[in-house]
Image (spheres, rainbow, N blue to C red):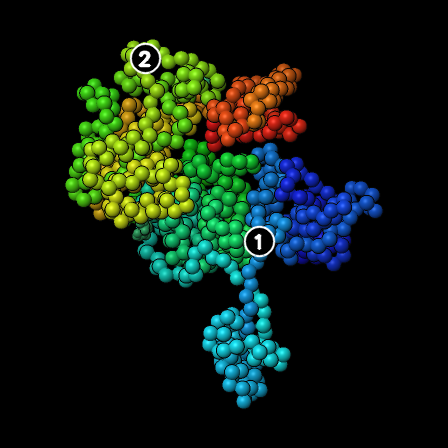
Amino acid sequence: MPDPAEASAGRYAQVIVDIASSDTDRVFTYRVPQGMALLPGTRVSVPFGKRTLEGIVLSFGDDPGMPEERVKDILRPLEDYPAVLPPLVDLAREIARDTRTPLAMALRLMFPAEMRRGRVKIRTRATARLRTGEHGIQETLDAALAASARAPKRRLLLRLLEDGLSHPVEELRALARDPLAALKALEEEGFVTLAEEEVFRSPYPDAGPVDRDPALTADQREVLSEIVPAIRSGGGRFLLHGITGSGKTEVYIRAARECLSRAQGVIVLIPEIVLTPQMVSWFKGRFGDVAAVLHSRLSAGERYDEWRRIRSGHARIVIGARSAVFAPVSNLGLIVVDEEHEASYQAENAPRYDAREAAASRASREGAALILASATPSVLTFAKARRGDLMLLEMRHRAQSQPLAHVTVVDMREELRLGNRGMFSTLLHERLAECLDRGQQAMLFLNRRGYAPSVMCRKCGAVMKCPQCDVNLTWHQADRMMHCHYCGLRGGLPQECPTCGSSYIKPVGVGTQKVEEEFRRLHPDVGVVRLDMDTTSGKDAHQILLDRFRSGEARVMVGTQMIAKGHDFPQVTLVAAVLADMSLHLPDYRSEERTFQLLTQLAGRAGRADMPGEVVIQTYAPEHFAIQAAAKQDYRAFFETEFSRRRDKLYPPFTMMVRLLCEHALEDTARGVSSALYGRLKDWLAQRPALKKRVIFFREDASPIKRIMGLWRTQVLLKLLEHPESGEVLDFLKQLSEETWPCRVSLEINPASLA
Ligand code: ADP
Ligand code: ZN
Ligand code: ZN
C-alpha cells in the first residue's frame, strides 16, 4: 500500500458527502491540507455551505476541476484509519453500477450504521502495565522494587504486573485495596503506564479453541489438495458440490487454518445465522476468539464492537449472513459461501446486490480464493462451473459413511382414487406410527412460502399454467380469477381439466396449522411443535421450540422450509414432504429449482446418526422431473433438464427479468406513474429498433401483491435477452427511475421475488 501521507497530502480529494440522508450522490472536491494523511475510504468532516457534513474520501487527483480559490479544505478525518477499506470503495462502485443504485447507498453497506454521526460510544476501561525499559521488563521491575522497599502495596502491585501484560485496574482492585494512588505514584516515577483501553462487547463469551481436528476423509483430502495450493497462489474459484453430510464444514475449517497460518483473513457466509448455530459453534470451538460473528440479531453495540474487532485485526475469521461479505477484513485469503443456492444471498432492498457475485468480485480484487458450496448448487452457479468460470469439486460420500435416506414418492391422485381424502397417505400413516413406536422422531414439512394457492386438477394432478410464460397461474380470491404474475394474463376457473376433462379443479394450498391439527387428531398424546413464520416471531420462540424438539419432549415437528436445513437431530428417522407440489406451483420460473433443492436438503435431514432414515414425498405430480431427481438425489439429472428448459423458455441465465416498481399510498398515483414510465419506455424503444429486439416483452400492470403496508404497488415488467446491448436498456431505466416522480420508483434487476 502506498504511504498515505505521500499519496494524499497537498492534493485534491473527491468526497461523497452526507451518505446517510441523500438518495442521490453528492460528490465534491476538497483540498487535503498539508500534513493530513488520508486513504480512500476514510471518513472525513467537511464544510458544506454553512454546515459541517460527514463524507467519505473516494479518490485523489491533482486537478481541482474548478477555480482554486473556491476549493475548501477537509476539516479533519473522523477516524485515523479508513472506515471503508480501499478495495471495498471499489466494490461499492461496482455494486452501484451493476444494480443501478446511487454510490451513497452502496457505501452504506460497508460500515455499521452506528458509526455515522457518532451514535455508538466506545467503551473503555483503565488498565495498568509495567513500562518496558531499554533492557526489557525485568530492568523496570528491579528498579521499581528497589524504589518500593518500604511500600508493601507497591511491591504487591509490581508482582501482579510482572508478566508485562496490561491488567484492568478493576482486576487489581480485587487483589490490592485502593491501588490507584500507588499506581499513580509508580506512573509518575516512570515504572508503570496507565491507559484507557477499548472494551469489546462480545455477543459470545470469550473462549479459547477447545475442539481438536478430526482425521480428514478421502473426499475432504482430495478437495483440499486443490483449494490449499490456490490459497497459496492467491486466487482460485471453486464450486464445492458435496452431498448433505459430506463434511463441507471441515473443508472450510482447514482452508481457514491455511489462511491464518499465512496471516490472511477469512469470510464465511451462511444463509441465516439463527438457523445454523452449528457453524458458529464449530468455528468458535476450533478458533476461539479469532472468529467473529456478524448478524442482524446482535445489538447495535455488539455489532459495532465485532466490526472493530475485525477492522483492527483481532478477529481474522468472520462468520456472517449476506452483508458479512463486506466485513472489513484486510489481507483477505478466502471467502466461503455455504449453501450458495439460498435465495437469501440476494438483497431484498436497494442496493439489490447478490452476495455471491459480490464475493466473487471481492475475491478476485483482493487475491483471495472463493468457494461456493452446496449439496444442490443453484442452476446459475452450476452453469458457471460447466463453462469453466469455477472449478468443480465434488464430495460424493458422507463423512461418517451413514447411508443416504430411503426415499418413497407417494402419488396422491391414487390416494384420492382409493377414497383417502385426508392429507396423510396410507404409507405416511404407517411410517409415522412405526417411527413413533420405535421411540424416534419425525418431521412433517410443508413448503408454504407461496402467498397464494395454485389451481390444480385433483384427479390428474395437472396445474394450470400460463400459455405464454410457462409459469403457474395463481388463484386470487379477491377477484376469483387465475393470474399470471409474469405477463398479467388472467382468467376464470376452467370448468373442466384441459388435460383429463375431469371437474375436480380447485385452488390448492394447505397450511402448517392444518397439518398440525390433523396430526393431533391422529395422535392426541404425542408431543408436537410447529415452526413457521407465525410461531417463531418472538425473540426466542425459535430456540424454545427447537429445544422442545431436541429434548424429546416433542416427538414430531411440523414446519415450513425453515426446518429443512442446518440442524442435526440424531433421533429423526422419518421426514415427510406433506405436499411437495406446493413449491412446484409457485408463480416463479425458479419453482422447479426450489422444489428440487428443498426436497434434496430435506432428505439429508433423515437418519444422520447410525439409524437409517426414511423420506416420504407426497405429490400429485410423481413423474415431475424435479421430484424424480430429488427422490434419486441426482443433481446432474435435475440440472440437465432444468438448464434446457431455461433455454427453451428464455429464463435466466439466458435472459433477465427487470422491473420498475412504483409505490404510493394512493392507487391512482402509483398507476399514473407506472403508465407514464411505460409510455416513455415504449417511445424510447420505438426509436431504437435494434435494442427493441433484445426486449422479449414489456408491460405495465398492478404488482402481484397489490398493496403492502398501505402502499399500492404497480410495475413495469420487462424480460430482456442476456446480451451486452441490453445494458443500454438498463441505463435508460435507471435514468427514468431517477427522474422526479410523484411516487417512489425502484429499479429491480433479476429480483429474488416478483411479488
Ligand atoms: P455438510 O455441510 O457437507 O452437509 P457437515 O459439515 O455438516 O456436512 O458434516 C456432517 C457430519 O460429519 C458432521 O456431524 C461432522 O461433524 C462430521 N464430519 C465431518 N468431517 C468429518 C471427519 N473428517 N471425520 C469425522 N466426522 C466428520
Ligand atoms: Zn404469462
Ligand atoms: Zn385433470
Q: Residues within 10 Å of mark 2 (few under 14, many from 20)?
A: many
Going from the N terminus, do you reach mark 2 or mark 1 first? 1
Q: Nearer the viewer, residue 453 or 708?
A: 708
Q: Amino acid at mark 2?
A: Cys
Q: Nearer the viewer, residue 357 or 180?
A: 180
Secondary structure category for the residue under label 1:
loop
Residue 69 vertical placement versus 712 (above, below): below
Horizontal and vertical percent position of residue 86? 61, 49
User: Residue at 47% across / 32% down in the picture?
Assistant: 752
Mark in front: 2 vs 1: 1
User: Residue at 73% across / 53% down in the picture?
Assistant: 75
Horizontal and vertical percent position of residue 239? 42, 41
Which residue matches tag 1? 120
Q: Residues within 10 Å of mark 1 (few under 14, many from 20)?
A: some
* Residue 527 tag number: none
Horizontal and vertical percent position of residue 547? 31, 48
Q: Is residue 679 visible?
A: yes
Which residue matches tag 2? 497
Q: Residue 369 vs residue 113: left or right?
A: left
Horizontal and vertical percent position of residue 281? 38, 53
Secondary structure category for the residue under label 2:
loop
Which quarter shows the N terminus?
bottom right
Residue found at the very far bottom of the displayed protein: 150
User: Residue at 42% across / 43% down in the picture?
Assistant: 272
Q: Residue 151 vs residue 424: left or right?
A: right
Residue 288 vertical placement versus 141 (above, below): above
Q: Amino acid at mark 1?
A: Val
Disc 2 under 8 Å from ligand 3? The reply is yes
Say which quarter of the image contains residue 498.
Answer: top left
The Cα atoms of the two marked residues, 2 and 1, are separated by 62 Å
